[in-house]
Amino acid sequence: MTTDTLPAPTTTGASLEDMAPRQIVAELDKYVVGQGQAKRAVAIALRNRWRRQQLPPDIAEEIAPKNILMIGPTGVGKTEIARRLARLARAPFLKVEASKFTEVGYVGRDVESMVRDLVDIAVQMVRDEKRESVQEKAAANAEEQLLKLLVPSPPLTGYGAQTAEEEESQKATREKFRDKLRSGSLDERRVEVDVEESGYPSFEMFTPQGVEEVGVNMKDMLPGLFGGRRRKQEMTVADAREVLHQQEAEKLIDRQQVAREARDRVEEGGMIFLDEIDKVAGREGGRGPDVSREGVQRDLLPIVEGTTVTTRYGMVKTDHVLFFAAGAFHVAKPSDLIPELQGRFPIRVELSALTESDFVRILTEPETALTKQYTALLSTESVEISFNDEAVAEIARLAVEVNASTENIGARRLATLMERLLEEVSFEAPDMAGVELEIDGDYVRRALADLAKDQDLSRYVL
């Protein structure tokens, strides 16, 4: 089962890694229906990471993460389990399609790019946390900067410094403006603010693996050349407050500390989800696509085994990054992967296909169930819709029927049916303010009758 939106990260006291596996599974149950075996496996893997961190460094260094291979058809929750786990654990998480590494050139895009992308995500996470911790001080500093723009200090005269009376008068004027500033009465006044030039170049490098884009932050590499380029921009006080707030927050953040913490988070808590791993499964046959597939596997191997990758924020070791791999394995088999790569995924979990009763639960139980999403969306137009049990059962029955007669896309079929079911209501909603509509079984059958009969669903398949 999968849903298409993610909630804000959990703000409960303890981090997910401090929870027992049973508690982790209970958290995942809020968003993902069924697949108990897979949930148990990822919960144990996460708890083992916490256990390793409690050990002495010499022992902890020797304990490798137990990477997980998820096997199951599309739309049953493989990606969602890993993504929810990372969001709940507040860990750097990256989802990457393994098949994309065969798209450019002979082997494909440099596989180390996934680690660089993961570090970028970690840096942004740490920077956001640091920025949040300095909000109060940054706001105070921004206010002082605004006051200097609104009440500039008088230029020095030939008689020297200001007298005590002039200083008191200046201070009193500034305090009056401070009160006006806080009340919002000056928000529309215009001031000139120094803003940094943005937009630094990125380059494309031709590597043996193909064309690799390198987004280089030239400001960090060549501060003497790019640092300090500023221009004056006129804006309202309200806009200036936001700009100055961001500038002051950045001044209070230690970039080197951010980079260090981000690297540590990736090395100790990073997660990479390799989707479509079955698309690169294949043994070398001398020519054809299998050669490229095995090349990708051999490129992936050192990353999964543990290597050191150069990033713009320093060297990062992948020895303790937790890897999830997933694939339908309809054509290929897990045994078609090269033995070395198979050995780096010691835990294999088979996810079961979804049943009609699973679809009913998916539509109603998760905190972000589709029925709740559409109810919330239409409530913004003052249209109140509700789904009775018969309607939910009918949608689930049709999802199973359409999946059986066409391509089986699992729980994603529910999004297809829900969109078609509420197409007319969504279109007319602006003119239906105040209407209360109950969706029942007859409504579902009428709205989806043609869709259920039509075998060519290419327009609606997600």
Image: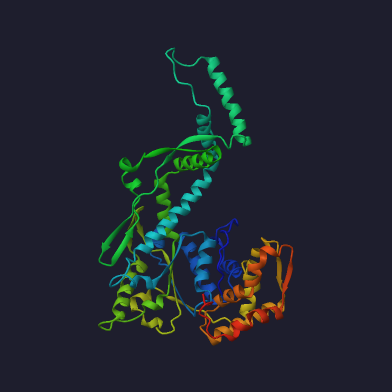
Residue pushed farthest top? 159
Q: Position of residue 249 (x, y in %)?
A: 48, 42
191 relative to 6, above or below: above
Q: Position of residue 270 (x, y in %)?
A: 44, 61
228 relative to 54, above or below: above
Residue 62 visible (yes or no): yes
Q: Is 393 left, or right, of 410 in this rendering? A: right
Q: Quadrant of residue 59?
A: bottom left
Q: Quadrant of residue 23?
A: bottom right
Residue 47 visible (yes or no): no
Q: How is the image coloured?
A: rainbow
Q: Is 415 left, or right, of 94 in this rendering? A: right
Q: Position of residue 64 (x, y in %)?
A: 40, 67
- Residue, x 46% and y 41% (percent of image)? 247
Q: Position of residue 248 (x, y in %)?
A: 48, 39
Total marks placed: 0
Instruction: Quarter of the image for the N terminus: give it.
Output: bottom right
- Residue, x 43% and y 52% (percent of image)? 261
